[in-house]
Image (tube, coloured by chain):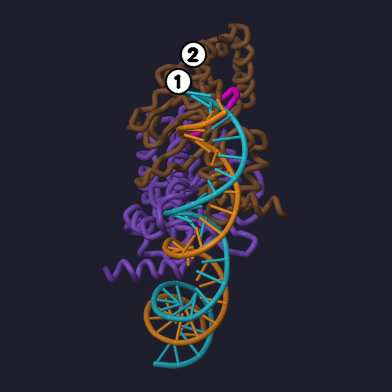
Chain colours: A brown, B purple, C cyan, D orange
Amino acid sequence: MALAVDIDTKKEIIIKNISRYITLNDEEREYFESILHYRKLAKGKVLLHYGEIAQSQYFVISGCLRNYSMDEDGKEHIITFAIADWWISDLYSYITETPAEQILDALIPTEVFEICKKDMEEVYVRIPKFERFFRILFQNSMVNQMRRIRQVMSVPAEERYKIFIKQYPNIFREIPLKYIASYLGISPEFLSKIRNKIAHT
Amino acid sequence: MALAVDIDTKKEIIIKNISRYITLNDEEREYFESILHYRKLAKGKVLLHYGEIAQSQYFVISGCLRNYSMDEDGKEHIITFAIADWWISDLYSYITETPAEQILDALIPTEVFEICKKDMEEVYVRIPKFERFFRILFQNSMVNQMRRIRQVMSVPAEERYKIFIKQYPNIFREIPLKYIASYLGISPEFLSKIRNKIAHT
DNA sequence: ATGATTTCTTAATGTAGTTCAAGTTGAAAA
DNA sequence: TTTTCAACTTGAACTACATTAAGAAATCAT
């Protein structure tokens, strides 16, 4: 179990992240820190099951979460990875309060701060500046999603794989390739062929 | 040219849209209305050229805007359509303040309200409630983008076309099919085949 | 109305990707 | 140690798409 002092250091990270966009005074900062729940997740830990209604959002300190959906054939499609310094929640379920179609779990041992919805709503009321922070956050995430759409539609898989490696230079060594294939939207077999081709050129 | 009274009626629409999420008093409402610039766009009118930095966001009253990018081969990839009652504020260039890689134009005669960035920033300051409104707006857009990613990756083109028709039952009759093909991420020829197949079953 | 331009379709051929099946490697469990 | 199991690779057959090129249909400007 992590010591309290460690956790405080980790809270620094999240505050620093927030401070890039809004300025918090000591009181606000303390209040916000008080609603952060540190959690250490074992590999495979599921944060949001299929059909559950998301009650939390998360900030990742280390490790890797994935947000994925299943199609009728039981095939998994990874929508997002969240690694250090990223916020994540199954927004759809969280926002609409409908059962999750996407599952959220830890691919490797992962540390997160959890913020539950009730607390989050209160933050918005008590420190309206946070509306701004999350507006900017969602704006930026949205831009990333749009970029991804464009990529999936117009960039061939081999190129996408190369871009992926650049974007996630560390994580791609730690997680099984099949997850990367899923994220790239291709079969593991085809990823294998791409890797083979790259290795021999 | 539209009469002032017409424009006021149209401003009603946008206020109604906003009021689903936040409550405005008369003063706030009046102030917000004062920064809305009504524009009637001819077919083909470009709102944002390649390489420009977006200075405005838009609310669509009628017609259809498209936001698209070009790849190296000069092929167009439509990222978003915006039709009646939609905000198109998810412009990459607008958010990041970088030269646009994506072009915004009107596919058919279109009416919009334009809000320029400077005014928008002032709204956030004078009526912080708008941070909330746009946070929710971006949240929702992001969810839509994520759904689209999932679709492009796991749903075959024929199914996607059927979903599209349901989602845009009116617009799909008014714009050339090639744009729909582009949005679906397929070639016009293949869309043609899909349509032929559907017609004969 | 006429031609010109754009849109849509059809068909042939090509390719990026999938699926299936079999085999390899490596790590963990017994 | 051996068994087991998941991750990864390889190859053959297949499919969903793209590309090219041509013609038909619709739209537009004159």
State the extent of the magenta-drawn residues as a range: A60-66
Q: Residues within 10 Å of mark 2 (few under 14, many from 20)?
A: some
Kindly identify which residue carries mark 1: A120
On whether residue B174 falls in the magenta region, the answer is no
Left or right, A150 with respect to B2, comes to right
Question: Does A138 sit above or below residue B175?
Answer: above
Which residue is labeled 2 in the image? A35
Q: Position of residue B131 (x, y in %)?
A: 49, 30
Disc 1 residue type? Met
Q: Chain of mark 2?
A: A
Q: Earlier in the sequence, mark 2 or mark 1?
A: 2
Who is closer to the viewer here, A78 or D12? D12
Check disc 1: other Cα within 10 Å, few if <14, some if 14-19, many if 20+: some
Instruction: Determine whether A15 is above or below B9 in the image.
Output: above
Callout 2 secondary element: loop
Q: Do tags 2 and 1 sit on the same chain?
A: yes
Chain hosting mark 1: A
Q: Quadrant of the C terminus of chain A?
A: bottom right
